[in-house]
Amino acid sequence: MSLAERLRSIPEVEYVLDRRAELYSYESDAMTLMSGRPAAVALPVSTTAVAEIVRVCNDADVPFVARGAGTGLSGGATPVDGCVLIECARMDRILEIDATHRTARVQPGVINQHLSRAVAPLGLYYAPDPSSQSACTIGGNLAENSGGPHTLKHGTTAPHVLALEVVLPSGEVVELGRPDGHPAGYDLRGVFLGSEGTLGIATAATLRLLHLPARVEVLLASFPNLHSACRAVSEVIAAGIVPAALEMMDDRTVAVIEASVYAAGYPLDAGAVLLCELDGSVESVAYERERVARLFHSAGALEVRPAATPEEQLALWRGRKGAFGAMGRLAPDLYVHDAVVPRTRLAEVVDAINRAAAAHGIQISNILHAGDGNLHPNITFDRRDHDELERVRRVGREILEICVAAGGVLSGEHGIGLEKRDHMDLLFTEADLVPMHWVHDTFDPRDLCNPGKAIPEPRACTESNPRHRGYGSVEF
Amino acid sequence: MPGMSELDPEQILGEEHVTRDSGARIDGVPVEWTLRPGSPEEVARCLAGACQAGRAVVAFGAGTKQMGLNPLAAPVVWKIELRRLDRIVELDADEGVVVAQAGVPVAALDAAARSVGKRLGFGTAGPPAATLGGTYSADPLVPEVSVERRSSYEALGVQVALCDGSLARAGGRVVKNVTGFDLVRLYFGSFGTLGIVTELALRLRPEPEVRQVHDLGLSDLAAAISQGHRLGLVSPLPDGVVALPGGAGGATLRVLLEGSEADVAARAAKVGGESRPESAWAALAEPLWRAPAPGATRLRISGLTSDAGEIRAAIAKRAGDESLRLTFPAAGIALAEVADAGSVEDLWQLAAQQGWAFRMEDAPREQRLRLDAFGSEPPALPLMRALKQRFDPGRNLAPGRFVGRL
């Protein structure tokens, strides 16, 4: 029996795709510079089915890679050649909503935004909100420990996850964590989150929900340049104010948004724009609004304008969240970079990044989750120009070097995936990586579960290890 | 591990920083060597040496958690004291980050943070002597404990000495980070059974402008629990809620509110009750680490908030209400002192049946020999055993002390 036939024989696997044309759209996630060709794509609808697929893969010694909506930006769901891609998008049921304890139990294919919509009538929402939240799945969020604009106040995905049902790389099913948030023993839930599907496949998650705030306000502030905007961010943070979100866009980003269908009325004459969302009680928001406006003005704001209506708030956010789509106007390809630096060093780091890009003749627009020092230098380019592609690759590495030299890290929310796996040496020594390998090898001793992602192999092993084969297209 | 094949602790640290066979014991086990390293590198060398010598090792901060662990499964032990790792490496108020060595007392670190208008987000309710490394390693229980503010996520980065003599870092010094596996969470609450924490980077929280404590008098503890549960259903949540026996009406619900003046005033009006001095909240901490009466066990049972009434009833039936306290809002956590061993065993069994989390905070050695101090086996215990085996193949790091007697 062929591999595809064995997969088709598993109950609750709705579809198995193995024709070349069917597989084409699964060759990469949203990091399209890397790709691989799966032998088959299986679409299960239950935990039992996922476990059985994994067991079949173990029997056949075939690697397997879990995938959600394919919106990941670091190549975390890029298939290895010849693997079985386990597409979890059809496991899209909200299994339980517990308003009393403010939790929801969901399958991994639930779309992030759908969860918040489902619990809104109960006065609740799910806080992590990646820019792709209208498409990305909870399973992908768990794998990448995804963030979003509201990470500043509420954290990335991990603190919102109480418990997980996981199919281990052996096919065994295990529960990690507890719904009351007080697990005994090692916090395997915490280790699993953000491990990019290399330690197993999450098939259900108990998530923490938050009360919808009584009051939300959004301020739009424009600044003559990025330095004054960064100063404003530093002063807000130093003053002990924790906005729900504090987002920055440079003039290039504003220009491209305003020229697109996402136009939000951002000022075109500013060097940088800040969006500041405050949430909480009516009293706390009113108080913080005054303080934030005062700090923005003292940092040199040209204008500070609160959104007057909920519709205006939405429009301001639509512009920000549509920014990546709008960049399609600049060039055929977009590389959304992701790194974090100390918040107090944002301005100098963005300057250095812009200089590096200019030196290579590369076009960059900057979006920053400025409140937590998370930068997204967005590189627009044309992959058909091989020379430009090579320069993009070099600038990508230089951006990381600049950030690490400033005391930063390689990723704030997109993960390492394939994109940055071989740049981990910028931040970690071989000794730092050894315990990560111990964890990996404990969960996946056969190295079949999304091999080659998240952590690099120790140098001595890179020549021979299959984890380093089977990914194609562009060395990055 | 250069030079570790013929280990002499006196050569590693100098004779003034080692003591041999002092007659000291850790939880009844004789201490063969007491080592007082002065740097992370020395910690790593001491650990590697102990592992090579096949000796059990216990990392020791202030020693405040020794009676809440399973007994050591070793005839003798090397004690690695971390008090000389007492340096605050970096305190950046503008960035909201502090980096400090493991032996720094949490109280001293918190005082340093408060001097620049910040505070630590965890561990500040421990005993005055508790160290940063010990607090992180022991999964601290604080009066404000809630799922809303998971204390493990206050830690941003960690440096750990491992059995092979290496020092490994995980995480970083920034407030947002998904670079590599999240080992900062793995080491948190692992009681030094995977490695010895030598340095930590922590998030600093802003000092609130106003801090108010309110007491609501209720007829009994059951009523206080119901009211505490209700407070968890409304927005915005209080910053801490504890139900206690005693007070004018029979039981008290003590509520903490933090924030701006206007915000706290508005929330206080909704909560009601009698205003208390701020020290009334701090006073809740002491019973968490005070030694129980001789022979008694201080234990913690946790469940969902809606379980709190049932947990209280189970404890009260065996030990009365007097020592009980229940912490809200997001999880129902009951703490109590239980005098007789039979009742502790009953509660251990009941927690296992009901799916409640059970933990002995401070118990006689005999009790911890009879029953796992961490409750019944968690479902992922085989995976935890495998992980322990990878990190500590010689089973040198606090053998037998953690969940499942790992």
Image (spheres, coloured by chain):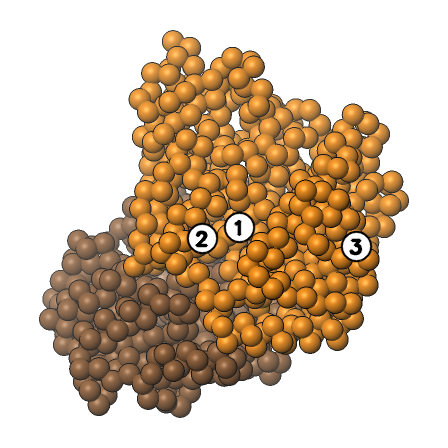
Q: Percent x, y for residue A437?
A: 53, 41
The answer to whether marks 1 and 3 sit on the same chain is yes
Q: Are marks 1 and 2 in contact (CB under 8 Å)?
A: yes
Q: Secondary structure at mark 2?
A: loop
The residue that mark 2 highlights is A126
Give the left or right position of residue A64, taking residue B171 as reference.
left
Q: Are marks 1 and 3 in contact (CB under 8 Å)?
A: no
Q: Real-space Cα distance between discs 1 and 2?
A: 8 Å
State the count of labels.
Answer: 3
Foreground residue, A351 or B388?
Answer: A351
The residue that mark 1 highlights is A129
Q: Percent x, y for residue A112?
A: 47, 44
Q: Percent x, y for residue B134?
A: 45, 68
**What amino acid is at disc 2?**
Tyr
Residue at 60 percent across and 83 percent down: it is B115
**What amino acid is at disc 3?**
Leu
Foreground residue, B392 or B90?
Answer: B90
Q: Which mark is residue A268?
A: 3
The answer to whether marks 3 and 2 sit on the same chain is yes
